[in-house]
Amino acid sequence: MLRVYMDANATTPLLPEVMEAMRPYWLEHFGNASSIHQHGQQARTAVDRSRETMAQFFNCHDAEVVFNSGGTEGDNTAIFGLLHPGDHFITTSIEHSAILQAAHRMARHGVETTFVAPQPSGLIDPTDILRAIRPQTRLISVMLANNETGVLQPVEEIGKIAAETGIFFHIDAVQGAGKIEFDVRRFGCHLLSISAHKMHGPKGIGAMFVRRGTPIDPLLVGGSHERKQRAGTENVPGIVGLAKAAELAMHSLDDGTIYRLAKLRDRLEAGVLQLPGTGVNGIGADEKPVPRAANTTNIWFDNLEGEALVIALDMKGVAVSGGSACHSGATEPSHVLMAMGVDKNRARASLRFSLLKTATEADINHVLRVVPEAVEHLRALSPVAAGTLG
Ligand SMILES: Cc1ncc(COP(=O)(O)O)c(C=O)c1O
């Protein structure tokens, strides 16, 4: 059976070039980058070279790149490393739980957070950020691309507000990496987090841009790795894999891959929307179309259960994810869609399709064959469709 993976925002496979770049650092070049002997020096050279690539990726100085374990660590570091009791923090209600849960924890340490809600389109209005600022506001954190809708946030405008008001600005750029061009100077941020596994790199490795002079306390202390900003023996194969993935991502931004991906996503979307009782979450909610990451669409299907559709599609070889998350056994509708004002039942009946950058026309054809069959079948069985579910 043809299998089509359309859950790239959950994770992506390694590209073969990434695997090849990493291989020697698991085997012959296994040294500890802090060791003086040749094994160590080979590892150190690889880390230094990877740092140069990441500096190019972010458009920053080498010394402003800190390797870590991924997006969760970057998000936590920004919040735990900058905020002190009595500070005020501004973020949005559509962030990843790595931000939201860190903010909730800081409440116990005397940090109050304002969660700015999005427009119905999923876009954060920078003036809402401006309005939330208080004299005690020390940090603003806004994501670059939303993981569920793909909506790209106006980080440059928020960066300008942060600069004018003297507030630190962190961007969770995990879902933007490899999908849009990065320039931390243009974004106007002090901190920015990315994760390799969302961009065809390995899991458990990421990097943070930390603007020179940002007074951030490290999350992990111990050895003096990463200029004392992140203790722990460097994950050399991971770092090499991240840098290779970033290098390939930079090429894809230049060689038309992302444009091609947007065309495939648009064809998929238009095809699915042929079905009655469907629509794209966010699109059409406001007057103007909103910018989105090229690979993502989030579609609602009336009169069926989203979870049942995820399972039905999986059985037909299509991997997507639902607009709900399982918290302690109960399926909760997505906090992102709810914050956008999507009705609870519609949020539960929404699916995210997120394409790998290797997606093909044949993948789209397969999905467009399978989705109508599965939807029609489920609607025929559904108590929701039959009106027997209160
Ligand atoms: C927007 C966003 N931030 C942070 C994370 C966490 O990244 P990681 O899996 O590297 O910890 C994710 C992963 O789903 C994400 O989508």
Image (cartoon, rainbow, N blue to C red):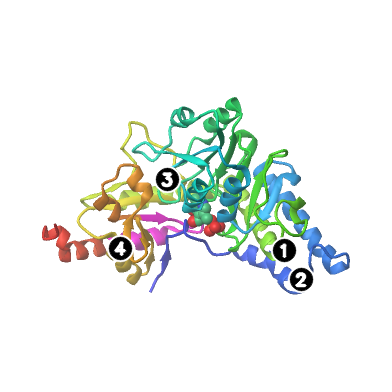
Q: Is mark 1 on a helix, strand or loop?
A: helix
Residue 280: give x, y in percent of width and height: 32, 46
Nearest-to-viewer mark from 3 and 4: 3
Q: Earlier in the sequence, mark 3 or mark 2?
A: 2
Q: Earlier in the sequence, mark 4 or mark 2?
A: 2
Residue at 49% x, 35% y: name it: 154
Q: Is mark 2 on a helix, strand or loop?
A: loop
For the residue marked with disc 2, what is the amino acid?
Answer: Phe
Disc 1: which residue: 236
Whether residue 199 is visible to the viewer of this picture, yes or no, is no
Label 1 – label 4 distance at C-alpha: 39 Å
Q: What stretch is highlighted in magenta?
A: 352-371
Label 1 – label 3 distance at C-alpha: 33 Å
Nearest-to-viewer mark from 1 and 3: 3
Query: Would you place residue 179 above or below residue 307 in this image?
Result: above
Nearest-to-viewer mark from 3 and 2: 3
Tell which residue pokes out farthest to the top in this image.
164
Label 4 – label 2 distance at C-alpha: 44 Å
Instruction: Look at the numbered discs 1 and 2 and tell me whether their residues touch, using CB distance below 8 Å.
Output: yes
Which dot marks residue 64? none
Disc 3: which residue: 94
Which dot marks residue 307? 4
How many neighbours does mark 1 have within 10 angstroms: few (below 14), some (14-19), or many (20 or more)?
Answer: many
Q: Looking at this view, is 33 or 9 the one in front?
A: 33
Q: In which quarter of the image is the C terminus?
A: bottom left
Q: What element carries label 3?
A: loop
Residue 144: give x, y in percent of width and height: 51, 43
Disc 2: which residue: 30
Residue 316: give x, y in percent of width and height: 33, 70
For the residue marked with disc 4, what is the amino acid?
Answer: Glu
For the residue marked with disc 3, what is the amino acid?
Answer: Ile
Going by the image, does 376 lie left or right of 336?
left
